[in-house]
Amino acid sequence: MPYQFTSLSAILCHPEKDGRTLVDQTISTDTVFCRSLVSEGYLTEQQMLHAADRYRLGRSKDGAVIFWEIDEQQQIRDGKLMYYHDNCHRDKDRNATWVTSLLKRQKKLSMIFDAERCLFGLHLLPSDPATTVIVVEAEKTAVICSELYPGAVWMASGGLTMLNAAKLQPLRDYRVILFPDTDEQGDTFKQWKEVADAAQEFFKYPIRVSPILEDNATQEQKIAKIDIVDFIFKKGEV
């Protein structure tokens, strides 16, 4: 049996004894991440519940939020487990891990399985190619911005170096804006511009890389490496 992402989706979508799939069993807003979105004023309770439902946010047994990566064909590629503090900042003392890694340890997935990950939120890709798709770095940013600016579909690469031309390919017929974080030297913007240039050949419309943070963030904010959510809520200022 070939160990491809479709076999992973079969494992995660296979009904358990209670009739629910493994993914269904994880769906929950009872995480520090979801609670802190509301307590820190990023979203209202209703907005948080709506966003959590759309992105199918899960909860691990030890309380991590699970950001499921589901592609445009609704196939589950992987899930990232991340830990947060009450202030909605990542708990950097606890490393993020992947569902595929856990399944391998439990011997439910072959050690030779190679996860084919995709953009977080790709399953929300609409049929109308006139819709704007905005790609940010962090899953948290996509979740928040999806409620603040619902006119676009928000996706996340999962990190600065997690974006590449192959991940962007499902968006080739759409109007795409990349929204990288900022930094003191402007390296993030340059790296994502290089990715956009590499992918452009296959795209119907020009891929835009937003310069809003590069042009408007203060030096202190750039040193803090803020993203668009930090900018909106005036984080990273001194």
Image (tube, rainbow, N blue to C red):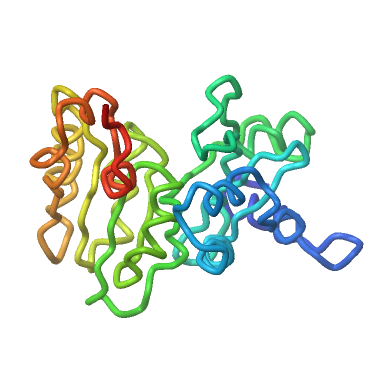
User: What is the count of numbered marks?
Assistant: 0
Looking at this rendering, what residue extends furthest in the top direction? 93
- Residue 156 is situated, as x and y percent measured from the top left of the image, at 38, 49
Q: Is residue 27 above or below residue 179?
A: below
Q: Quadrant of residue 10?
A: bottom right
Q: Quadrant of residue 25?
A: bottom right
Looking at this rendering, what residue extends furthest in the bottom direction? 128
- In which quadrant will I find the C terminus? top left
Between residue 51 and residue 191, name the one nearer to us.
51
Residue 144 lies left or right of residue 226; in this view the side is right
Residue occupying image coordinates x 15% and y 48% = 209
Q: Is residue 63 above or below residue 183?
A: below
Residue 78 lies left or right of residue 180; in this view the side is right
Between residue 64 and residue 198, name the one nearer to us.
64
Residue occupying image coordinates x 47% and y 45% = 117
Looking at this rendering, what residue extends furthest in the right direction? 17
Q: Quadrant of residue 191?
A: top left
Q: Is residue 82 above or below residue 129?
A: above
Residue occupying image coordinates x 41% and y 65% = 147
- Residue 60 is situated, as x and y percent measured from the top left of the image, at 72, 43
Residue occupying image coordinates x 20% and y 28% = 222
- Residue 101 is situated, as x and y percent measured from the top left of the image, at 65, 32
Residue 29 lies left or right of residue 127; in this view the side is right
- Residue 57 is situated, as x and y percent measured from the top left of the image, at 60, 55
Between residue 128 and residue 138, name the one nearer to us.
138
